[in-house]
Image (tube, rainbow, N blue to C red):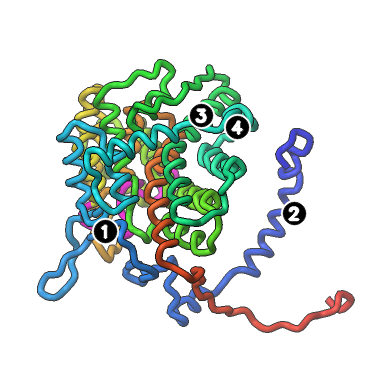
Amino acid sequence: MGTNNDANIYSESTPKLIDLAKVVEQADNIDPALFTEYDVKRGLRDLNGKGVLTGLTNISTINATKIENGESVPADGELFYRGINVKDIVHGTASSEKFGFEETAYLLLFGKLPGREELKEFTELLGFYRSLPTGFVRDIIMKAPSRDMMNTLSRSVLTLYSYDDYADDVSMANVLRQSLQLVSLFPLLAIYGYQAYNHYHEGKSLFIHPPKAELSTAEHILYLLRPDSQYTELEARLLDICLILHMEHGGGNNSSFTTHVVSSSMTDTYSVIAAAIGSLKGPRHGGANIKVIHMFDQMEQDLKDWADEEEVRDYLRKLLNKEAFDKAGLIYGVGHAIYSKSDPRAVLLKEYTVKLAKEKGMDKELALYELVERLAPEVISAERKMYKGVSINVDFYSGFVYKMLELPEELFTPMFAIARIVGWSAHRMEELANNSKIIRPAYKAVSKTQEYVPMEER
């Protein structure tokens, strides 16, 4: 498996594997009616899409409804980090002309905004941890580079276990130390992994810039990634805002819930974070902004006039009717499991996207995004039966921002992870501080009892 000598094993055995897969599907298939009969909350959601309450958290809150005349009705979405509206965090850090990732990370990890000296000490600590073990880049990242950066990130995180003399210590002080190191190291692991892939698989020049402790996280990412390490102030600030907005999103998202589940088994930090990375990698969770970019790339090729509302509306109908792009019947970047009227992250991101589009001379592309943002909810509401409203989500503009920042697509989802490691760390420590039981949900067995049949009688 994975060597040149057996590279054709899968293709040669494909017919047999397909036959066996059909047997597996038949054995594993469960009558959909049984889920209704036993009132199973598939995906841990009820029929209205509301998540089943499985825990409590202090870390973040999502509001998507309000009470009017005693009834819950859709409202503009709000996101709070430790009780503070993320809108105020973004506007507050931007207006003070300082980078906000570090301040927001402190808030999520410690439950309060840092004072000037606390922020200085915290930033210096992150800078201190911004170095990999001797030989790690050569021996781990450069060896067998993966085509998928999330797999590279996961492998690197798991390997760091071997370099930690206290890897299995789950005391709060040690887990905090491990968490801060991972927050600092994620940009290095992801970008060095990409540089190795770009060199060995794509034949490009290899750039491994040494880390700089004095840079903000957003600046450090652009410094590490670009061959000349150059970037503008606006580029770094917009990336900083992206990191803040992707840092956390309620305790119920798939990867944060994974963090709680795996942490409850009392396993080590590296195993927990690797599991969270595996969750985020899935296209239903962290990979959606790449789909948005590809959808718009195809749309720009197919449309004769990007400003023609009827032509754009007709194209959106084709997307829903599986007649365009990947024929999946989806308009990527539109709709969210919780938000209906608006996703606050998308609203905030758009404010600053407009500024960068002007700097990059991409006003025409921005206008198409804005047109789709306005028309897509109308088209979806007309074509589909909706139990709630629909609006764009954070993925709608984040991919466009990364494209303008000239980030390679291979790093789109790792950028999400670079931000979300803060939220995962906060959730891991919250689980360790509060829960003395392993998380073990119930699954009802619906299989029929069978008798064992001897081989000669089968």
Q: CA distance from mark 1 to mark 3?
A: 34 Å
Q: Which residues are magenta?
A: 322-342
Q: Quadrant of residue 386?
A: bottom left
Which residue was labeled with disc 2?
16
Tell me the element at label 1.
strand
Vertical position of residue 367 compared to residue 111: above or below: above
Q: Position of residue 369 (x, y in %)?
A: 26, 37
Residue 426 in magenta stretch:
no
Residue corresponding to mark 1: 62
Picture layout, residue 455 above or below residue 175: below
Which of the two discs, 2 and 1, sits closer to the camera? 1
On the rendered structure, is 244 left or right of 208?
left
Dot 3: within a 10 Å radius of its alpha carbon, few (fewer than 14), some, or many (20 or more) residues? many
x, y (%) of residue 403? 35, 30
Q: Quadrant of residue 412?
A: top left
Q: Position of residue 180 (x, y in %)?
A: 42, 43
- The answer to whether residue 335 is magenta is yes
| Mark 1–mark 3 CB contact (< 8 Å) | no
* Residue at screen point 65% across, 69% down: 27
Q: Dot 4 corresponds to which residue? A: 145
Mark 3 residue element: helix
**Alpha-carbon span between mark 4 and mark 1:** 38 Å
**The C terminus lies in which quarter of the figure?**
bottom right
Q: Exactly how many numbered labels are in the figure?
A: 4
User: According to the image, label 3 marks what residue?
Assistant: 192
| Disc on the earlier residue, 1 or 3 | 1
Quick one: label 4, few (<14), some, or many (20+) residues within 10 Å? many
Q: Helix or strand or loop: what does disc 2 sit on?
A: helix
Which quarter of the figure has residue 347? top left
The 10 Å Cα crowd at callout 1, few under 14, some 14 to 19, many 20 or more, is: some
Amino acid type at image mark 1: Ile
Amino acid carrying mark 4 in the image: Pro
